[in-house]
Amino acid sequence: MAHHAQPIALVTGANKGIGFQIARQLAQNGAAVLLGARDADRGSAAAKELLAEGLQVTFIQIDITNAQSIAAAAAQIDTAYGRLDILVNNAGIADYSDGAPSVAALDAVRREIEVNFIGALAVTQSMLALLRRSDAGRIVNMSSSLGSLTLNGDASWPFYDVRLIGYNASKAALNMLTIQLNAELHDTRITAVSACPGLVNTELSGNRGDRTPAEAAAFVVQLALRREEDRQGVYQSEQGALPW
């Protein structure tokens, strides 16, 4: 992936679900993984489980809605490693008092935007100095096909009737972050991608998905483990590119 012997990766929201499996599979592929979680007990327990598998995983406490927590995590990474090669902005929420524009609870919409978009932006801003020290930095924003403006406007799309104004808007904003990061960082060795893992059987989806977290993580890890010459910023599912 890079000239450095071992990639250093931070995965937010990694104590469970897809994030946990991304952390596991990145470590299985040789990365030194920082398993990020807001709750210290749950994060530590998740890291210990992976350590017991012989994987190089370290818990790092990070609340993506708290500026001090983010800054402390960045300082910890700087002290321990001096750089970051992979950032997976995985932490996210879905609030089921969200809904169509006419009925969505505004507090739910605010929470989803705050976590899914502003949280990812805040973490990215704080980690950019470390990513700039990488030979081939990669930012993976965990998006969704529900964030595609094109698909949301297509009446033939199977999920056309899934109207969650807060969640969908938060993922569309996250896609804008991917686009603008690539424009701003075009003269650096950092590339951002939006990854769509599909409908996954996790707590966030209400356990309605048809894919396991491990299956979904495999595609995300493939995107994260870029080569230096692989500079393409994409919005992609396992089946291929998605329209913005």
Image (cartoon, rainbow, N blue to C red):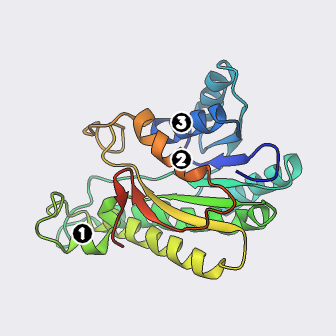
**According to the image, label 2 marks what residue?**
222
Q: Residue at x 22, y 62 (%)?
A: 99
Which quadrant would residue 72 be assigned to in this image? bottom right
Q: Name the one closer to the observer, 52 or 217.
A: 217
Distance between the alpha carbons at the discs numbered 2 and 1:
24 Å
**According to the image, label 1 marks what residue?**
151
Q: Name the one closer to the observer, 82 or 2.
A: 2
Q: Name the one closer to the observer, 173 or 8.
A: 8
Query: Left or right of 2: which side holds 110?
Result: left
Q: Residue furthest top?
A: 52
The amino acid type, in three-letter code, at marker 3 is Phe
Horizontal and vertical percent for residue 67? 67, 63
The amino acid type, in three-letter code, at marker 2 is Gln
Determine contact: label 1, label 3, CB under 8 Å. Answer: no
Q: Earlier in the sequence, mark 2 or mark 1?
A: 1
Distance between the alpha carbons at the discs numbered 1 and 3:
29 Å
Could you tell me which quadrant the C terminus lies in?
Answer: bottom left
Horizontal and vertical percent for residue 185? 66, 77
Question: Does the rendering let one see residue 65?
Answer: no
Q: Earlier in the sequence, mark 1 or mark 3?
A: 3
- Foreground: disc 1 or disc 3: 1
**According to the image, label 3 marks what residue?**
20
Question: How many labels sit on residues?
Answer: 3
User: In this rendering, is residue 174 above or below 202?
Assistant: below
User: In this rendering, is residue 135 above or below 42?
Assistant: below
Query: Left or right of 182: which side holds 56?
Result: right
Tell me the SS state at disc 2: helix
- Foreground: disc 2 or disc 3: 2
Horizontal and vertical percent for residue 115? 49, 60
Q: Earlier in the sequence, mark 2 or mark 3?
A: 3
